[in-house]
Amino acid sequence: QVQLVESGGGLVQAGGSLRLSCAASGRTNSGYTMGWFRQAPGKEQWFVAGINWRAGSTYYADSVKGRFTISRDNAKNLVYLQMNSLKPEDTAVYYCAEGDCSGYACYQAYNYHAWGQGTQVTVSS
């Protein structure tokens, strides 16, 4: 069973940047995809970005393309989400997740079997 722990959240002004980290420990699989999802208060959970451990294939929601970058460090079992040009609408709890998927399937939360506890990102206007 893999354990996922997010870090790096915080309060930032609009236009600023944050980098989230997700540390994966325990049993994992190099063929899996790591995803970032977010959930704002009273709203549904939405896919943000994903990356395959082995191939490095990346996926992004349209709302974050060009602003967010997902990357991974296979040696350290770390996944990062670099968030630039942050907007107030990016405010949410961000979750790291592990899934067995590829392509558009990785945009669906039900394809992920392990989740972190989340980290709060707040963007002030």
Image (cartoon, rainbow, N blue to C red):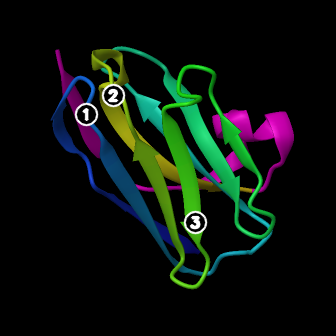
Residue at image location 25% in from the left, 47% down from the top: 9
Query: Of the numbered discs in the image, which one, if any, rests on residue 16?
Result: 1
Upstream in sequence: badge 1 or badge 2:
1
Residue 116 painted magenta:
yes
**Residues at circles 2 and 3 in contact by the CB criterion of under 8 Å:** no
Pinpoint residue 99: horizontal percent, then vertical percent.
69, 54
Q: Count residues near mark 3 (Cα–Cα under 10 Å), then give few for <14, some for 14-19, many for 20+.
A: some
Give 54 or 118, whichever is nearer the viewer.
Answer: 54
**Residues at circles 1 and 2 in contact by the CB criterion of under 8 Å:** yes
Residue at image location 46% in from the left, 50% down from the top: 81
Residue type beneath disc 1: Gly
Which quarter of the figure is the N terminus placed in?
bottom right
Pinpoint residue 29: horizontal percent, then vertical percent.
73, 75
* Nearest-to-viewer mark from 3 and 1: 1
Q: Judging from the image, what secondary structure is the residue with disc 3 in?
A: strand
**Which span of residues is magenta-colored?**
100-125
Q: Judging from the image, what secondary structure is the residue with disc 2 in?
A: loop
Q: Judging from the image, what secondary structure is the residue with disc 1 in?
A: loop
Q: Is residue 33 above or below residue 36?
A: below
Residue type beneath disc 3: Arg
What residue is disc 2 on?
86
State how far apart marks 1 and 2 are (Cα): 6 Å
Query: Of the numbered discs in the image, which one, if any, rests on residue 72?
Result: 3
**On the rendered structure, is 70 left or right of 57?**
left
Pinpoint residue 7: horizontal percent, then vertical percent.
30, 58
The quarter of the displayed image where residue 33 is located: bottom right
Q: Count residues near mark 2 (Cα–Cα under 10 Å), then give few for <14, some for 14-19, many for 20+.
A: many
Give 82 or 114, whichever is nearer the viewer.
Answer: 82
Residue type beneath disc 2: Leu
Q: Count residues near mark 1 (Cα–Cα under 10 Å), then give few for <14, some for 14-19, many for 20+.
A: some
